[in-house]
Image (spheres, rainbow, N blue to C red):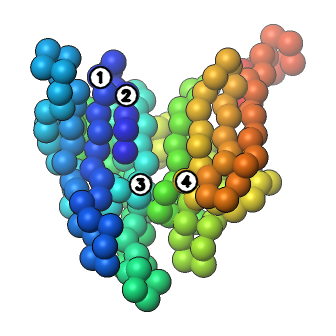
Amino acid sequence: IKILHNNEMYIIGGQVDIGVTPVNNTDVYKFNDATNDWDIVGQTPSTLWTCTGTGWSAGGYMYITGGGKINSLIGTYEFLNDKIYRSSDGLTWTEYATLLSGMPAMWPTTQTFNGKVWYITGYATGGNQIGMWNSTNNGSLWSLYSTSFSARHATSMCEFDNALYFGFGNFHNDLYRIEKVSCAAQGCANDDV
């Protein structure tokens, strides 16, 4: 998981081995400009499988969620994480909220845009999942936004030129755009998408 937080770059977790029994890496690294290298500054909770999760920065905190562990020999899940954890510094992590049913997955994607956190689900029981949610309060409450695209995991998502772009993922070559709508032009109360 990579997160830009308070103008500092963090790399969180990862997978140590891609064999039959992969090992979850819980280390939190922060880039050190003075040494031009990465320093370990903390660890995530051992229950969070960070190598298949996602994260974002908002409101003074880093948030991490999602992910899971699959037994590749028989194709069954050992668990899918449904908890959201947060930290202001990468050192101390606390449980913050729980994802809604249908959201927990491996290789989900998040992005902040227009004052909201956007979340696209990934791979879970039964294969690729479908669903895009957003939250105006950093992930403590979620609203389903769309299911009008193909099921996938490892979706790419970014903000560019006042729009949110998402698409691709495994075996897909499509791209979607969500534009910010100006309320001055539409007569609504707040800018929205």
Q: Earlier in the sequence, mark 1 or mark 4?
A: 1
Q: Residue furthest right?
A: 186
Q: Quadrant of the C terminus?
A: top right
Q: Which secondary structure lies at badge 1?
A: strand
Identify the residue at horizontal 74%, vertical 33% (top origin). 178
Q: Which residue is mark 2?
A: 4
Q: Nearer the viewer, residue 142 or 170?
A: 170
* Crowd tier of the residue under label 2, counting other residues whose Cα lies within 10 Å: few below 14, some 14–19, many 20 or above: some
Q: Are marks 3 and 4 in contact (CB under 8 Å)?
A: no
* Front position among marks 4 and 2: 4
Q: Marks 1 and 4, Cα distance to the nearest angstrom?
A: 24 Å
Residue 154 numbered tag: 4
Q: Is residue 44 above or below residue 28?
A: below
Q: Quadrant of residue 117?
A: top right
| Residue drawn at (18%, 21%) of the image | 36
The tag earlier along the polypeptide, 2 or 3, is 2
Measure the alpha-carbon separation of dots 4 and 2: 19 Å
Depth check, mark 1 against mark 4: the one in front is 4
Residue bearing mark 1: 8
* Residue placed furthest toward the top: 184
Asked if residue 106 lies left or right of residue 171, the reply is left
Residue 92 at least partly seen: no
- For image coordinates 53% across by 71% down, the residue present is 124
Mark-to-mark CA distance, 2 and 1: 6 Å
Q: Quadrant of residue 52?
A: bottom left
Residue labelled with disc 3: 53
